[in-house]
Image (spheres, rainbow, N blue to C red):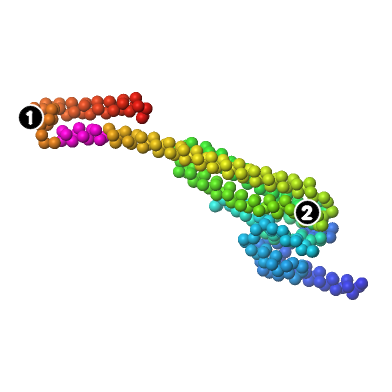
Amino acid sequence: MTLSRKKKEPAATKEKQEKQALGLESVTWGGLTWLNIEQPTERETEYLAQNYPFHPLDLDDCLSRIQRPKIDEYPDYLFLVFHFPIFNAEARVTTPSQLSVFIGNDYLITLDKGELKPLVKLFKDCQLNEETRQEYFNQGSGYLLYRIIDRLIDYCLPILSKIGGNIEQAEDGIFSTARPKAVREISILRRDVISFRRIIWPMRAVIGSLEVKLRRFTRTDLSVYFGDIVDHVDRIWDGLDEYKEIIEGLNDTHDSLATNRLNDIIRVLTILATIGTVLTVVASFYGMNIPLPWGANPGGGPFTWLILLLAMLGITAGMLFYFHRKNWL
Protein backbone atom coordinates (compact mmCIF):
# COMPACT_ATOMS: atom_id res chain seq x y z
CA MET A 1 0.00 0.00 0.00
CA THR A 2 2.83 2.39 0.84
CA LEU A 3 4.67 1.67 -2.42
CA SER A 4 1.51 2.26 -4.45
CA ARG A 5 0.92 5.56 -2.70
CA LYS A 6 4.52 6.64 -3.40
CA LYS A 7 4.01 5.88 -7.10
CA LYS A 8 0.79 7.89 -7.29
CA GLU A 9 2.13 10.93 -5.50
CA PRO A 10 4.99 11.61 -8.00
CA ALA A 11 2.52 11.14 -10.89
CA ALA A 12 0.12 13.64 -9.36
CA THR A 13 2.98 16.05 -8.70
CA LYS A 14 4.18 15.72 -12.29
CA GLU A 15 0.67 16.44 -13.61
CA LYS A 16 0.42 19.50 -11.37
CA GLN A 17 3.76 20.77 -12.66
CA GLU A 18 2.66 20.28 -16.25
CA LYS A 19 -0.53 22.24 -15.58
CA GLN A 20 1.43 25.07 -14.04
CA ALA A 21 3.85 25.12 -16.97
CA LEU A 22 0.96 25.39 -19.44
CA GLY A 23 -0.86 27.97 -17.32
CA LEU A 24 -3.93 25.75 -16.93
CA GLU A 25 -6.44 26.62 -14.23
CA SER A 26 -8.65 24.15 -12.43
CA VAL A 27 -11.05 23.95 -9.50
CA THR A 28 -11.33 20.86 -7.30
CA TRP A 29 -13.94 20.18 -4.64
CA GLY A 30 -15.21 16.91 -3.19
CA GLY A 31 -13.25 14.73 -5.59
CA LEU A 32 -14.53 16.58 -8.68
CA THR A 33 -12.16 18.69 -10.82
CA TRP A 34 -13.18 21.30 -13.34
CA LEU A 35 -10.41 22.17 -15.77
CA ASN A 36 -11.12 25.15 -18.02
CA ILE A 37 -8.82 25.72 -21.01
CA GLU A 38 -9.11 28.97 -22.94
CA GLN A 39 -7.67 29.30 -26.43
CA PRO A 40 -6.54 25.64 -26.61
CA THR A 41 -3.51 24.74 -28.70
CA GLU A 42 -1.69 21.51 -29.50
CA ARG A 43 0.26 21.81 -26.25
CA GLU A 44 -2.94 21.62 -24.20
CA THR A 45 -4.33 18.72 -26.24
CA GLU A 46 -1.05 16.85 -25.81
CA TYR A 47 -1.37 17.34 -22.04
CA LEU A 48 -4.91 15.92 -22.16
CA ALA A 49 -3.75 12.97 -24.27
CA GLN A 50 -1.05 12.13 -21.72
CA ASN A 51 -3.24 12.37 -18.63
CA TYR A 52 -6.72 11.30 -19.81
CA PRO A 53 -8.08 8.42 -21.92
CA PHE A 54 -9.41 10.63 -24.68
CA HIS A 55 -9.67 9.57 -28.30
CA PRO A 56 -7.23 11.42 -30.60
CA LEU A 57 -10.04 12.41 -32.97
CA ASP A 58 -11.87 14.13 -30.11
CA LEU A 59 -8.75 16.09 -29.24
CA ASP A 60 -8.40 17.13 -32.89
CA ASP A 61 -12.02 18.28 -32.88
CA CYS A 62 -11.22 20.65 -29.99
CA LEU A 63 -8.92 22.59 -32.31
CA SER A 64 -11.24 22.51 -35.30
CA ARG A 65 -13.41 25.51 -36.14
CA ILE A 66 -15.98 23.74 -38.29
CA GLN A 67 -17.34 21.12 -35.92
CA ARG A 68 -21.10 20.73 -35.60
CA PRO A 69 -22.71 20.31 -32.17
CA LYS A 70 -22.61 16.64 -31.25
CA ILE A 71 -22.31 14.02 -28.50
CA ASP A 72 -19.73 11.21 -28.70
CA GLU A 73 -20.26 8.53 -26.07
CA TYR A 74 -17.46 6.31 -24.68
CA PRO A 75 -17.36 3.81 -21.80
CA ASP A 76 -15.52 6.20 -19.46
CA TYR A 77 -16.49 9.65 -20.68
CA LEU A 78 -18.56 11.79 -23.02
CA PHE A 79 -17.23 14.25 -25.56
CA LEU A 80 -19.57 17.09 -26.44
CA VAL A 81 -19.39 20.02 -28.81
CA PHE A 82 -21.69 23.02 -28.36
CA HIS A 83 -22.08 26.25 -30.29
CA PHE A 84 -23.34 29.33 -28.47
CA PRO A 85 -24.08 32.71 -30.07
CA ILE A 86 -21.79 35.69 -29.61
CA PHE A 87 -22.75 39.08 -31.04
CA ASN A 88 -20.00 40.64 -33.13
CA ALA A 89 -20.58 44.38 -32.71
CA GLU A 90 -18.14 45.31 -35.48
CA ALA A 91 -19.74 43.10 -38.15
CA ARG A 92 -23.20 43.47 -36.57
CA VAL A 93 -23.89 39.75 -36.82
CA THR A 94 -24.25 36.86 -34.38
CA THR A 95 -21.42 34.34 -34.72
CA PRO A 96 -20.96 30.91 -33.11
CA SER A 97 -18.44 30.29 -30.35
CA GLN A 98 -17.49 26.65 -29.86
CA LEU A 99 -17.41 24.96 -26.47
CA SER A 100 -15.84 21.48 -26.29
CA VAL A 101 -16.49 19.38 -23.18
CA PHE A 102 -15.01 16.17 -21.78
CA ILE A 103 -16.99 14.79 -18.87
CA GLY A 104 -16.18 11.80 -16.66
CA ASN A 105 -17.09 10.66 -13.18
CA ASP A 106 -14.58 12.85 -11.36
CA TYR A 107 -13.69 15.54 -13.91
CA LEU A 108 -15.16 18.10 -16.26
CA ILE A 109 -12.92 19.68 -18.91
CA THR A 110 -14.11 22.65 -20.95
CA LEU A 111 -12.24 24.13 -23.91
CA ASP A 112 -13.32 27.42 -25.44
CA LYS A 113 -11.99 30.66 -26.90
CA GLY A 114 -12.68 32.72 -23.78
CA GLU A 115 -15.56 34.56 -25.50
CA LEU A 116 -18.35 33.02 -23.43
CA LYS A 117 -18.69 35.49 -20.57
CA PRO A 118 -21.07 33.39 -18.41
CA LEU A 119 -18.62 30.47 -18.51
CA VAL A 120 -15.65 32.68 -17.57
CA LYS A 121 -17.60 34.31 -14.74
CA LEU A 122 -18.84 30.99 -13.36
CA PHE A 123 -15.35 29.50 -13.38
CA LYS A 124 -13.95 32.50 -11.48
CA ASP A 125 -16.80 32.29 -8.96
CA CYS A 126 -16.00 28.64 -8.35
CA GLN A 127 -12.33 29.52 -7.85
CA LEU A 128 -13.05 32.26 -5.32
CA ASN A 129 -16.15 31.13 -3.42
CA GLU A 130 -16.39 28.01 -1.31
CA GLU A 131 -20.19 28.20 -1.24
CA THR A 132 -20.34 28.27 -5.03
CA ARG A 133 -18.10 25.23 -5.28
CA GLN A 134 -20.23 23.36 -2.78
CA GLU A 135 -23.44 24.26 -4.61
CA TYR A 136 -22.22 23.27 -8.07
CA PHE A 137 -19.82 20.40 -7.33
CA ASN A 138 -21.66 18.36 -4.69
CA GLN A 139 -23.99 16.56 -7.12
CA GLY A 140 -21.49 15.28 -9.64
CA SER A 141 -20.02 16.38 -12.92
CA GLY A 142 -23.33 15.99 -14.75
CA TYR A 143 -25.01 18.56 -12.54
CA LEU A 144 -22.08 20.96 -12.96
CA LEU A 145 -22.36 20.68 -16.75
CA TYR A 146 -26.09 21.36 -16.49
CA ARG A 147 -25.43 24.59 -14.59
CA ILE A 148 -22.91 25.69 -17.22
CA ILE A 149 -25.28 25.02 -20.12
CA ASP A 150 -28.15 26.68 -18.28
CA ARG A 151 -26.15 29.89 -17.90
CA LEU A 152 -25.03 29.87 -21.51
CA ILE A 153 -28.58 29.32 -22.80
CA ASP A 154 -29.87 32.16 -20.62
CA TYR A 155 -27.12 34.32 -22.14
CA CYS A 156 -28.82 33.86 -25.53
CA LEU A 157 -31.97 35.66 -24.40
CA PRO A 158 -30.44 39.18 -24.19
CA ILE A 159 -28.99 38.69 -27.69
CA LEU A 160 -32.45 37.74 -28.92
CA SER A 161 -33.95 40.81 -27.22
CA LYS A 162 -31.36 43.03 -28.89
CA ILE A 163 -32.36 41.70 -32.29
CA GLY A 164 -35.99 42.51 -31.43
CA GLY A 165 -35.02 46.09 -30.55
CA ASN A 166 -33.11 46.46 -33.82
CA ILE A 167 -36.15 45.22 -35.74
CA GLU A 168 -38.32 47.89 -34.10
CA GLN A 169 -35.82 50.57 -35.11
CA ALA A 170 -35.76 49.26 -38.66
CA GLU A 171 -39.56 49.31 -38.74
CA ASP A 172 -39.55 53.00 -37.79
CA GLY A 173 -36.91 53.71 -40.42
CA ILE A 174 -39.00 52.19 -43.21
CA PHE A 175 -41.55 55.01 -42.95
CA SER A 176 -38.91 57.74 -42.82
CA THR A 177 -37.23 59.42 -45.75
CA ALA A 178 -33.92 57.53 -45.34
CA ARG A 179 -35.03 54.57 -47.42
CA PRO A 180 -31.57 53.38 -48.61
CA LYS A 181 -30.51 53.16 -44.97
CA ALA A 182 -33.67 51.18 -44.12
CA VAL A 183 -32.85 48.68 -46.87
CA ARG A 184 -29.39 48.18 -45.42
CA GLU A 185 -30.74 47.73 -41.88
CA ILE A 186 -33.24 45.12 -43.03
CA SER A 187 -30.50 43.22 -44.87
CA ILE A 188 -28.24 43.26 -41.79
CA LEU A 189 -31.07 42.03 -39.57
CA ARG A 190 -31.94 39.25 -41.99
CA ARG A 191 -28.32 38.08 -42.02
CA ASP A 192 -28.19 38.22 -38.21
CA VAL A 193 -31.35 36.15 -37.77
CA ILE A 194 -30.20 33.58 -40.33
CA SER A 195 -26.86 33.23 -38.54
CA PHE A 196 -28.57 32.87 -35.15
CA ARG A 197 -30.94 30.21 -36.52
CA ARG A 198 -27.98 28.31 -37.98
CA ILE A 199 -26.44 28.19 -34.50
CA ILE A 200 -29.55 27.16 -32.58
CA TRP A 201 -30.97 24.56 -34.95
CA PRO A 202 -28.37 21.76 -34.40
CA MET A 203 -28.17 22.63 -30.68
CA ARG A 204 -31.82 21.66 -30.16
CA ALA A 205 -31.16 17.99 -30.92
CA VAL A 206 -27.99 17.86 -28.80
CA ILE A 207 -29.54 19.45 -25.71
CA GLY A 208 -32.72 17.40 -26.13
CA SER A 209 -30.77 14.12 -25.87
CA LEU A 210 -28.20 15.26 -23.31
CA GLU A 211 -30.07 14.44 -20.10
CA VAL A 212 -30.16 10.71 -20.83
CA LYS A 213 -26.42 10.67 -21.53
CA LEU A 214 -25.54 12.49 -18.29
CA ARG A 215 -27.43 10.24 -15.90
CA ARG A 216 -24.37 8.18 -15.07
CA PHE A 217 -22.42 11.29 -14.07
CA THR A 218 -24.75 12.70 -11.44
CA ARG A 219 -26.67 11.67 -8.35
CA THR A 220 -29.57 13.96 -9.18
CA ASP A 221 -32.52 13.43 -11.51
CA LEU A 222 -31.90 16.10 -14.15
CA SER A 223 -34.97 15.42 -16.29
CA VAL A 224 -36.87 18.43 -14.93
CA TYR A 225 -33.81 20.69 -15.18
CA PHE A 226 -33.07 19.79 -18.77
CA GLY A 227 -36.77 20.06 -19.58
CA ASP A 228 -36.50 23.70 -18.52
CA ILE A 229 -33.42 24.20 -20.74
CA VAL A 230 -35.24 22.62 -23.70
CA ASP A 231 -38.14 25.03 -23.10
CA HIS A 232 -35.70 27.96 -23.21
CA VAL A 233 -34.14 26.70 -26.44
CA ASP A 234 -37.58 26.25 -27.99
CA ARG A 235 -38.52 29.77 -26.91
CA ILE A 236 -35.39 31.12 -28.57
CA TRP A 237 -36.17 29.19 -31.74
CA ASP A 238 -39.79 30.41 -31.75
CA GLY A 239 -38.56 33.97 -31.26
CA LEU A 240 -36.20 33.61 -34.21
CA ASP A 241 -39.04 32.23 -36.33
CA GLU A 242 -41.18 35.21 -35.38
CA TYR A 243 -38.38 37.65 -36.16
CA LYS A 244 -37.81 35.95 -39.50
CA GLU A 245 -41.45 36.47 -40.46
CA ILE A 246 -41.39 40.07 -39.24
CA ILE A 247 -38.29 40.85 -41.29
CA GLU A 248 -39.85 39.30 -44.37
CA GLY A 249 -42.97 41.40 -43.76
CA LEU A 250 -40.86 44.54 -43.32
CA ASN A 251 -39.03 43.78 -46.54
CA ASP A 252 -42.33 43.35 -48.41
CA THR A 253 -43.64 46.57 -46.85
CA HIS A 254 -40.52 48.43 -47.87
CA ASP A 255 -40.77 47.10 -51.42
CA SER A 256 -44.41 48.17 -51.62
CA LEU A 257 -43.65 51.66 -50.35
CA ALA A 258 -40.71 51.99 -52.70
CA THR A 259 -42.81 50.80 -55.65
CA ASN A 260 -45.62 53.23 -54.82
CA ARG A 261 -43.19 56.09 -54.43
CA LEU A 262 -41.54 55.20 -57.74
CA ASN A 263 -44.96 55.10 -59.42
CA ASP A 264 -45.75 58.54 -58.02
CA ILE A 265 -42.49 59.91 -59.37
CA ILE A 266 -43.02 58.33 -62.78
CA ARG A 267 -46.60 59.68 -62.92
CA VAL A 268 -45.45 63.24 -62.15
CA LEU A 269 -42.61 63.04 -64.65
CA THR A 270 -44.95 61.63 -67.31
CA ILE A 271 -47.41 64.50 -66.81
CA LEU A 272 -44.60 67.05 -67.02
CA ALA A 273 -43.26 65.38 -70.16
CA THR A 274 -46.72 65.36 -71.74
CA ILE A 275 -47.28 69.06 -71.00
CA GLY A 276 -43.78 69.87 -72.17
CA THR A 277 -44.38 68.01 -75.44
CA VAL A 278 -47.49 70.07 -76.22
CA LEU A 279 -45.73 73.33 -75.40
CA THR A 280 -42.77 72.29 -77.51
CA VAL A 281 -45.06 71.70 -80.48
CA VAL A 282 -46.57 75.18 -80.08
CA ALA A 283 -43.14 76.77 -79.74
CA SER A 284 -41.89 74.85 -82.78
CA PHE A 285 -44.67 76.17 -84.96
CA TYR A 286 -43.93 79.74 -84.03
CA GLY A 287 -40.25 79.16 -84.49
CA MET A 288 -40.71 78.45 -88.17
CA ASN A 289 -39.89 81.20 -90.65
CA ILE A 290 -43.41 81.45 -92.13
CA PRO A 291 -46.30 83.81 -91.47
CA LEU A 292 -48.49 82.66 -88.57
CA PRO A 293 -51.23 84.33 -86.54
CA TRP A 294 -49.61 86.53 -83.85
CA GLY A 295 -46.30 85.33 -85.14
CA ALA A 296 -43.03 87.21 -85.57
CA ASN A 297 -44.05 88.88 -88.83
CA PRO A 298 -44.87 92.42 -89.89
CA GLY A 299 -48.49 91.85 -88.85
CA GLY A 300 -47.57 90.91 -85.32
CA GLY A 301 -47.80 93.39 -82.49
CA PRO A 302 -45.33 94.14 -79.71
CA PHE A 303 -47.30 91.99 -77.26
CA THR A 304 -47.33 88.88 -79.41
CA TRP A 305 -44.91 87.08 -77.03
CA LEU A 306 -47.24 87.82 -74.11
CA ILE A 307 -50.22 86.41 -76.00
CA LEU A 308 -48.26 83.26 -76.79
CA LEU A 309 -47.11 82.94 -73.17
CA LEU A 310 -50.67 83.27 -71.91
CA ALA A 311 -51.78 80.70 -74.47
CA MET A 312 -49.17 78.25 -73.25
CA LEU A 313 -50.19 78.85 -69.65
CA GLY A 314 -53.78 78.25 -70.60
CA ILE A 315 -52.89 74.99 -72.31
CA THR A 316 -50.93 73.91 -69.24
CA ALA A 317 -53.79 74.79 -66.90
CA GLY A 318 -56.29 72.98 -69.10
CA MET A 319 -54.21 69.83 -69.20
CA LEU A 320 -53.65 69.88 -65.42
CA PHE A 321 -57.42 70.31 -64.90
CA TYR A 322 -58.06 67.36 -67.20
CA PHE A 323 -55.50 65.17 -65.39
CA HIS A 324 -57.05 66.13 -62.08
CA ARG A 325 -60.55 65.17 -63.26
CA LYS A 326 -59.16 61.78 -64.31
CA ASN A 327 -57.52 61.35 -60.86
CA TRP A 328 -54.12 61.13 -62.48
CA LEU A 329 -52.81 63.76 -60.07
| Rendered residue at 72%/47% (across/down) | 230
Nearer mark to the viewer, of 1 and 2: 2
Q: Quadrant of residue 13?
A: bottom right
| Rendered residue at 66%/45% (across/down) | 236
Residue identified by numbered label 1: 298
Q: Secondary structure at mark 2?
A: helix
Percent position of residue 111, x then y: 70, 60
Q: Secondary structure at mark 1?
A: loop
Looking at the image, which is closer to me, 99 or 291?
Answer: 291
Residue 234 position (above or below residue 284):
below
Mark before the other along the chain sequence, 1 or 2? 2
Amino acid type for the residue under numbered disc 2: Val
Range of the magenta residues?
A: 276-287
Q: Is residue 229 left or right of residue 186?
A: right
Label for residue 209? none
Percent position of residue 315, x then y: 25, 27
| Rendered residue at 58%/47% (across/down) | 193
Residue 275 position (above or below residue 140):
above
Amino acid type for the residue under numbered disc 1: Pro
Q: Is residue 251 visible?
A: yes
Looking at the image, which is closer to me, 277 or 51?
Answer: 277
Q: Is the residue marked by circle 1 packed among few (<14), some (14-19), or many (20+) residues within 10 Å?
A: few
- Does the magenta-highlighted stretch encompass residue 88? no
> Farthest residue in the front direction?
326
Q: Quadrant of residue 308?
A: top left
Percent position of residue 82, x then y: 68, 56
Label for residue 212? 2
Residue 59 position (above or below residue 310):
below
Q: Is residue 114 visible?
A: no
Percent position of residue 270, x then y: 32, 36
| Rendered residue at 64%/43% (across/down) | 238
Could you tell me how far apart the alpha carbons at marks 1 and 2 are, in whole angstroms? 108 Å
